[in-house]
Amino acid sequence: MTEADEDAVAIENLVRERRTRLGWSQDELARRAGLSRAGVSAIETGRLVPSTAAALALASAFKCRVEDVFRLRRSGSSEPTWAWPPTRAKCRYWRAEVDGAVRLYPVEATPLGVVPHDGVLIDGTLVEGAAFDPARTLIAASCDPAVGLLASALAETAGVRLIALQRPSRQALALLGAGLVHVAGVHLAHADAPGGNAAVVRELLGQGYRLLRVARWEEGVAAAPRLKLTSVDAAVRSKLRWVGREPGSGARQCLDDLLGEARTPRRTATDHRGVAEAVKSGWGDLGVCLRLVSEEAGLDFLGVREEAYDLCFHGEIVHDPRIEALLDVVRSSGYRRALGELPGYRNADTGEVDSTSRS
């Protein structure tokens, strides 16, 4: 390596981020790693490049790999770019490394509630905050109302932050195909349909993708209890008000199968919980959603079909630490048990991987 190359290389570390996440003081970390507090402070601020022994000691204290705490960063790397343009002059954003580039994602409402942001755009200027490591941030486009279980397990076991963008299946796959998200949630096939979701992904995106089975879940009609409906046929024959879903969603596909495309609901919700809340609030009488959210809202539920829900990602990133962590978590006994305890979720084949590549 030439002197110019050495000048272009810097050590980026996540010591402070990991320490504060664990609630440790610098003194506590120094004690656990066998280092001085002054040394820990100097490493955190970048004033000191740690020796191999110090890096190993810190990784051991955090119970992680050295590369999870330290990595090389070249000063000539490209500036982050927006995944899509912000709509306001002042906008909070998240950072994530996707497809080899650091991208900025305008903060939006997520099923996870308020996720801490990495910075704020103010009149065209990026103001960085206590940014999370973009290489440890996983961007998922999904409509799974139980995604919080996955986010919690990823953070606890692997130190991976999950940003869950609320998107219907076809929109999620479009973002995946454009290289703007790591994984896309898809449920566009019946649980036992030939080819399953892999056939749909192959048609939309081509070969080279893999699908991680999360669950089989029950989709059906959520109905106001006052209606006392006893069958799906009775619901379909009724003149009651339906709450719809946007085109491209699995729920819309199910609704079209029930009503036919000629009957279009006057009101549309953007996710499963939105349908349940609309019915609960009296904006509609019926709507298609998952059993989980229907029961959470205290509504009657008439099952229609069982669907396969998968997380799709490109095979080229199967060895990305975030994808490896995702696979480990979904296959873990704790996650599978928690998932199987949810109303309408089945975990018999959770963790299995399918491919869009033809044999």
Image (cartoon, rainbow, N blue to C red):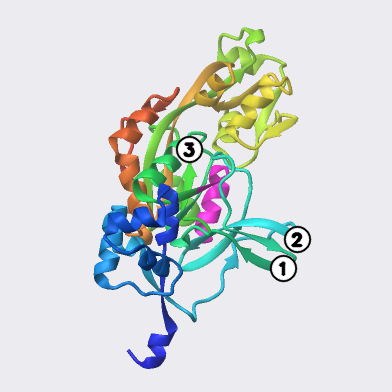
Disc 3/disc 2 C-alpha distance (Å): 30 Å
Q: Please give the label number shown on residue 148.
A: 3
Q: Position of residue 246 (x, y in %)?
A: 65, 39
The mark that comes first in sequence, 3 or 2, is: 2
Was residue 168 drawn as part of the magenta stretch in this picture? Answer: yes
Q: Position of residue 97 (x, y in %)?
A: 48, 63
Q: Is residue 338 left or right of residue 121?
A: left
For the point 26% across and 62% down, which residue is it? 57
Residue 65 falls in image quadrant: bottom left
Q: Is residue 32 left or right of residue 119?
A: left
Q: Quadrant of the N terminus?
A: bottom left
Residue wearing tag 1:
124
Residue 252 falls in image quadrant: top right
Residue wearing tag 2:
89
Q: Are marks 1 and 2 in contact (CB under 8 Å)?
A: yes
For the point 29% across and 54% down, which residue is it? 32
Q: Amino acid at mark 3?
A: Gly
* Highlighted magenta segment, given as a residue range: 163-179
For the point 43% across and 25% down, which residue is it? 342
Question: Could you tell me which secondary element the residue under label 3 belongs to?
Answer: helix
Q: Nearer the viewer, residue 190 or 130?
A: 130
The answer to whether residue 65 is seen in the rendering is no
Q: Position of residue 317 (x, y in %)?
A: 37, 60
Q: Amino acid at mark 2?
A: Ala
Was residue 237 drawn as part of the magenta stretch in this picture? Answer: no
Disc 1/disc 2 C-alpha distance (Å): 7 Å
Q: Nearer the viewer, residue 212 or 3?
A: 3
Circle 2 packing at 10 Å, graded few (<14), some (14-19), many (20+), is: few
Q: Position of residue 163 (x, y in %)?
A: 51, 49
Q: Amino acid at mark 1?
A: Gly
The mark that comes first in sequence, 1 or 2, is: 2
